[in-house]
Image: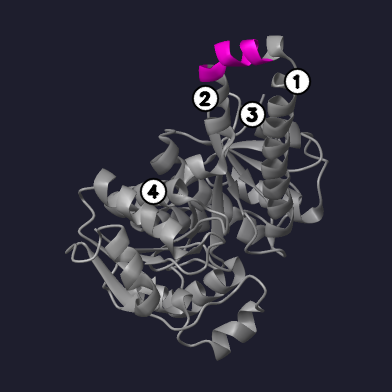
Amino acid sequence: MRLAVDVMGGDHGPEELLQGVKLGLEAEPGISKVYVVGPPTELDPLLERLQLRGNPRVEVRPASEVITMQDDPAVALRRKKDSSVLRTLELVREGHADAAISSGNTGGLYAGACIRLGRLEGVVRPTIACILPSFHGAWVLVDGGANPECTPEHLLQFGVMGSAYAKAVLGLPTPRVGVLSNGSEDAKGTDQTRAALRLLRATGLNCQGYCEGYDLFMDGVDVCVCDGFVGNIVLKSAESLGKAVRGMLKEELTASPIRKLGALMSKGGLKSIARRMNPETYGGAPILGLKGWVFKIHGSARRTSLLHAMHQARRCVDLRLNDTLVADLAAAGAATAQLPPADAPPPRTSPAVT
């Protein structure tokens, strides 16, 4: 397997992400090549320092520009033709790499990937799939922020792709799929969510109906479907809450000598909780529905986040998950095509013969 990694878009500079590349190569012997993308004059000394220069599994591909977090994605893609994001995506498009990873501007990465790679057969809108922790496991959020305005058909496809992804990455045989709403009753939600729920129920997926915010972190659902506007709010709120809880625990458990002793005795459990609540544990968020694999990691990502993203990329490529997405979407399209119009009366039945 071959990877292309944009090491220029992160908050902590390219050295931190190159450390992640080093960890990934040590952990994943099946990765034959990692193309690191950025200015050679900046990357070569770092590779020398990390003892990666001369490694046959590492190759620098030049890019002279960076799409920053402050850039307007549409404008930057037109003006910064030699950006590290575009050069990374081109390695996938040209067949040199099987997957791309970037911590850069999300809008630029998504738009660039749609333009450079194109969509899988049958896909209307690719979606960002994010893994988040729950009480006893993890769950998948689709969409994590790529599509702020969606139709019911978009949400249907998000649910199908999210379910296939949960099977592959979380190892769930029949993921429970729910549409995020303000209540569990079918009458709740909006016209959009009610129509999406109707479509999802016709697909044969393990559709549980609506899910509420309470269900997300209490093992009530495995795949949560929503538009990117709502999904990004859920994602950022969850990450903020996780940081707040960790901060409160640290403050309270160091407030007195007795509490410090208790914290020392609970050190193993506290570390385990921190690991489960850390977004970096779950690696990158793939953009599902592209002709090629693209993973987004946080702008503030550390080396372990890139390591986990490399694990995820290898797994998705090895399982040929894109083939599964195409087949599942075609099956869902065929199933929903048989639905009568939403406002059609129920079919009339003949009276029983007595």
Relative to residue 209, is residue 303 depicted above or below? below
Distance in Å between CA atoms under marks 3 and 2: 22 Å
Residue at x-position 31% and y-position 55% = 317
- Image x and y of residue 191, in percent: 80, 54
Does residue 127 appear in this view? yes
For label 4, the residue is 307
Q: Is residue 322 magenta?
A: no
Q: Residues within 10 Å of mark 4 (few under 14, many from 20)?
A: many
| Relative side of 203 to 59, left or right | right
Q: Where residue 152 sits in the image (x, y, percent)?
A: 68, 58
The C terminus is located in which quarter?
top right
Q: At label 3, which amino acid type do we have?
A: Gly
Mark 1 — residue? 255
The dot on residue 202 is none
Label 3, residues with CA under 10 Å away: few <14, some 14-19, many ≥20: many
Contact? badges 3 and 2 (CB < 8 Å): no
Q: Amino acid at mark 4?
A: Leu
Q: Main secondary structure of the magenta part?
A: helix
Q: Secondary structure at mark 1?
A: loop
What residue do we see at 56% from left, 43% from top? 279
Residue corresponding to mark 3? 220
Compared with 33, 22 (above or below) is above
User: Which label sits on residue 272?
Assistant: 2
Q: Which residues are magenta?
A: 260-268
Query: Which tag is nearer the camera, tag 3 or tag 4?
Result: 4
Whole-angstrom CA distance, mark 4 to mark 1, is: 35 Å
Q: How is the image coloured?
A: one colour
Query: Which residue occupies the foreground of this view, 138 or 334?
Result: 138
Give left or right: position of 76 versus 317.
right
- Give the spatial CA distance, label 4 vs label 2: 19 Å
